[in-house]
Image (cartoon, helix red, strand yellow):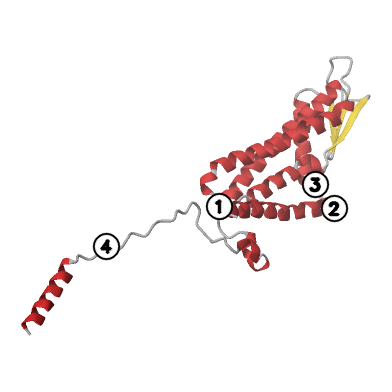
Amino acid sequence: MKIKNMRKFEMLADFLIKFNLLAIPMYVALFVGINFYPLQMFLTDVVYGTFKSEGYWISRSGITLMLFAPPASSDLSNPPGPPLVETIVMGFDCTAWKTMYAFAALVIATPVAGMRKKLKFILLGSVGLFLINIVRLVTTIKTAYTMGFQYLDITHTFLWREGLIVALLAIWFFWLRNQKNNISQGQTILRRVYPLFPVFYSKAKRLKPKQRLRRRPKAKRKPERASKRKAGQQRKKRRKR
């Protein structure tokens, strides 16, 4: 295997290993069933305020939203009453925490130098994904309220779940393209466990990125005139003797 191909293989393997290791805490959280109630309350407040400002008949109780059918009259001063159209609970999955965690894992696993830059971008990207998630929830509920809540799962699953993944990858690719000149090729995980896999590195050498082999300049030959003069003088001395 050539050195360049070996280096690319190391970087790809290092990225995949780090990303999968960072995914372990997410699966542990899913298994345990961790919730973050303040974030769910904040998301419920935002969605409730959005629908309330647009004149929807909606009420809330904690993280539960209740949508009502519009009244027959145009008098909106009375509190909303039956019939109840749908009840929506803002669970922890509605906060898009898995998307934001996967985004952070992608950025951390990417071999780009500078952890501070990564943390800043993770913060900005997470805020952007959270705003996109709010748009996702509002549009999904509006579509289901208009067309019927039997289409809620279809809209949520086939439209916005994949759409949020596309948004995540688009933000990551945009950052990766801007950081292509800042790719770090330091010591990878495979090189740290080198004693366990000596076969892969039997012929590989550690080279810096894009290192070019330079030919050594040829040593200049010394002028032969001085040596010829000395040889001639020695011959003359021998003849005189």
Q: Residue at x 68, y 45 (%)?
A: 103
Query: Comparing marks 1 and 4, which lies closer to the viewer?
Result: 4
Counting every numbered tag in the picture gives 4
Quadrant (top left, top right, bottom left, bottom right) of the N terminus: bottom right
Residue 31: image tag: 2
Residue placed at 75% from the left, 32% from the top? 136
* Cα distance between the residues tagged 4 and 3: 78 Å
Q: Which residue is mark 1?
A: 4
Write down the residue under mark 3.
Answer: 37
- Residue 220's label in the rendered image is 4
Instruction: Give the side of residue 135 with respect to residue 88, left or right.
Output: left
Q: Are marks 1 and 3 in contact (CB under 8 Å)?
A: no
Dot 1 or dot 4: first in sequence order is 1
Task: Point out residue 48 in the picture as x, y percentages from the top left corner.
Answer: 79, 32
Residue 193 seen by the camera: no
Residue 26 coordinates in the image, percent (x, y):
77, 51
Q: Secondary structure at mark 1?
A: helix
Q: How far across and down, in percent of the image, does residue 100 sit? A: 71, 44
Q: In this rendering, which labeled residue sits more in front, label 2 or label 1? A: 1
Please give left or right for residue 149 compared with residue 96 in the image.
right
Corner quadrant of residue 46: top right
The quadrant in which the C terminus is found is bottom left
